[in-house]
Amino acid sequence: MLNAAAADRNKDPILAVLKSRVASDRPLVALEISSGTGQHVIHFAKAFPNISWQPSEIEAQSISRNPEWGLRDVSLLKTLGQENGLRLEEIVDMPANNKCLLFHKDSVV
Protein backbone atom coordinates (compact mmCIF):
# COMPACT_ATOMS: atom_id res chain seq x y z
CA MET A 1 0.00 0.00 0.00
CA LEU A 2 1.20 3.50 -0.80
CA ASN A 3 1.80 5.80 2.14
CA ALA A 4 2.08 9.59 2.17
CA ALA A 5 3.22 11.42 5.30
CA ALA A 6 0.89 14.37 4.62
CA ALA A 7 -2.08 11.99 4.41
CA ASP A 8 -1.10 10.50 7.76
CA ARG A 9 -0.90 13.97 9.32
CA ASN A 10 -4.28 15.01 7.93
CA LYS A 11 -6.39 11.86 8.34
CA ASP A 12 -7.35 12.40 12.00
CA PRO A 13 -8.04 16.16 11.67
CA ILE A 14 -10.23 15.49 8.62
CA LEU A 15 -11.99 12.67 10.48
CA ALA A 16 -12.67 15.07 13.36
CA VAL A 17 -14.29 17.50 10.91
CA LEU A 18 -16.43 14.70 9.47
CA LYS A 19 -17.48 13.48 12.92
CA SER A 20 -18.57 17.02 13.81
CA ARG A 21 -20.74 17.23 10.68
CA VAL A 22 -22.07 13.70 10.05
CA ALA A 23 -24.45 12.72 12.83
CA SER A 24 -26.55 10.18 10.97
CA ASP A 25 -26.39 6.40 11.14
CA ARG A 26 -28.48 6.06 8.00
CA PRO A 27 -26.83 4.87 4.78
CA LEU A 28 -25.06 7.73 3.00
CA VAL A 29 -22.80 8.22 -0.02
CA ALA A 30 -19.67 10.40 0.08
CA LEU A 31 -17.33 11.43 -2.73
CA GLU A 32 -13.75 12.10 -1.69
CA ILE A 33 -12.01 14.38 -4.18
CA SER A 34 -8.31 13.80 -4.87
CA SER A 35 -7.96 10.55 -2.94
CA GLY A 36 -4.27 10.03 -3.69
CA THR A 37 -2.96 6.98 -1.86
CA GLY A 38 -6.40 6.05 -0.51
CA GLN A 39 -5.28 6.41 3.11
CA HIS A 40 -8.08 8.83 3.97
CA VAL A 41 -10.89 6.74 2.47
CA ILE A 42 -9.69 3.66 4.34
CA HIS A 43 -9.51 5.62 7.60
CA PHE A 44 -12.94 7.20 7.11
CA ALA A 45 -14.62 3.94 6.09
CA LYS A 46 -13.58 2.32 9.36
CA ALA A 47 -15.09 5.21 11.34
CA PHE A 48 -18.28 5.46 9.23
CA PRO A 49 -19.36 1.96 8.15
CA ASN A 50 -22.77 3.36 7.12
CA ILE A 51 -21.21 5.52 4.41
CA SER A 52 -20.42 4.21 0.95
CA TRP A 53 -17.18 6.03 0.06
CA GLN A 54 -16.25 6.84 -3.53
CA PRO A 55 -12.59 7.84 -3.87
CA SER A 56 -11.46 9.85 -6.91
CA GLU A 57 -8.13 10.73 -8.37
CA ILE A 58 -6.64 12.54 -11.31
CA GLU A 59 -3.92 10.77 -13.28
CA ALA A 60 -0.60 11.60 -11.54
CA GLN A 61 1.22 11.69 -14.87
CA SER A 62 -1.08 14.49 -16.06
CA ILE A 63 -0.31 16.63 -13.01
CA SER A 64 3.44 16.13 -13.46
CA ARG A 65 3.16 17.56 -16.98
CA ASN A 66 1.56 20.78 -15.74
CA PRO A 67 2.24 21.90 -12.13
CA GLU A 68 -0.52 24.53 -12.41
CA TRP A 69 -3.17 21.81 -12.54
CA GLY A 70 -4.96 21.04 -9.32
CA LEU A 71 -7.78 22.43 -7.23
CA ARG A 72 -6.39 25.61 -5.71
CA ASP A 73 -8.98 28.27 -6.50
CA VAL A 74 -11.65 27.99 -3.80
CA SER A 75 -13.86 30.61 -5.49
CA LEU A 76 -13.86 28.51 -8.68
CA LEU A 77 -14.74 25.40 -6.68
CA LYS A 78 -17.57 27.28 -4.97
CA THR A 79 -18.96 28.39 -8.34
CA LEU A 80 -18.66 24.91 -9.84
CA GLY A 81 -20.35 23.46 -6.78
CA GLN A 82 -23.26 25.91 -7.03
CA GLU A 83 -23.68 25.04 -10.71
CA ASN A 84 -24.06 21.40 -9.64
CA GLY A 85 -26.37 21.88 -6.68
CA LEU A 86 -23.66 21.91 -4.00
CA ARG A 87 -23.33 24.61 -1.35
CA LEU A 88 -19.94 25.37 0.25
CA GLU A 89 -20.66 25.30 3.98
CA GLU A 90 -17.25 25.51 5.60
CA ILE A 91 -13.50 25.64 4.97
CA VAL A 92 -11.28 24.04 7.62
CA ASP A 93 -7.48 24.44 7.62
CA MET A 94 -5.53 21.17 7.81
CA PRO A 95 -2.04 20.54 9.26
CA ALA A 96 -0.31 19.66 5.97
CA ASN A 97 -0.78 23.11 4.36
CA ASN A 98 -4.12 22.38 2.72
CA LYS A 99 -7.84 22.74 3.40
CA CYS A 100 -10.91 20.60 3.95
CA LEU A 101 -13.83 22.04 1.97
CA LEU A 102 -17.28 20.93 3.11
CA PHE A 103 -19.98 21.04 0.46
CA HIS A 104 -23.60 20.05 1.01
CA LYS A 105 -26.16 18.91 -1.53
CA ASP A 106 -29.77 19.38 -0.50
CA SER A 107 -31.84 16.24 -0.81
CA VAL A 108 -34.03 16.00 -3.90
CA VAL A 109 -36.28 13.41 -2.25
Image (cartoon, rainbow, N blue to C red):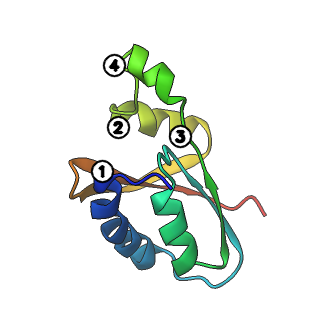
Which is closer to the viewer, label 3 or label 4? 4
Amino acid type assigned to the residue bearing label 2 in the image: Val
Q: What type is the residue that disc 4 sits on?
A: Glu
Asked where in the image residue 20 lies, by quadrant, the reply is bottom left
Residue with the most extreme top position: 65
Earlier in the chain: of badge 2 and badge 4, it is: 4
Q: Are marks 3 and 4 in contact (CB under 8 Å)?
A: no
Q: Secondary structure at mark 4?
A: loop
Q: Earlier in the sequence, mark 1 or mark 2?
A: 2
Query: Which mark is drawn over residue 14?
Result: none
Mark number, residue 82:
3
Q: Which mark is residue 68?
A: 4
**Mark 4 burial class by Cα count in 10 Å: few <14, some 14-19, many 20+:** few
**Disc 1 versus disc 4: nearer the observer:** 4
As shown in the figure, which amino acid type bears the numbered disc 1?
A: Lys
Q: Mark 2 near mark 4, Cβ–Cβ under 8 Å?
A: no
The location of residue 58, given as percent across then percent down, is 54, 32
Q: Which residue corresponds to the image point at 59% horizontal and 82% vertical from the top-left?
A: 24
Labels 1 and 2 touching (C-beta < 8 A): yes
State the image quarter where residue 77 is shown. top left
Disc 2 target residue? 74
Q: Which dot, 1 or 2, sits closer to the camera? A: 1
Label located before the other in sequence (1 or 3): 3
| Relative horizontal placement of residue 60, taking residue 3 as reference (left or right) | right
Residue 93 in the image: above or below residue 76: below
* Nearer-N-terminus badge (1/4): 4
Apparent side of residue 78 relative to residue 12 in the rendered image (left or right)? right
Q: Nearer the viewer, mark 1 or mark 3?
A: 1
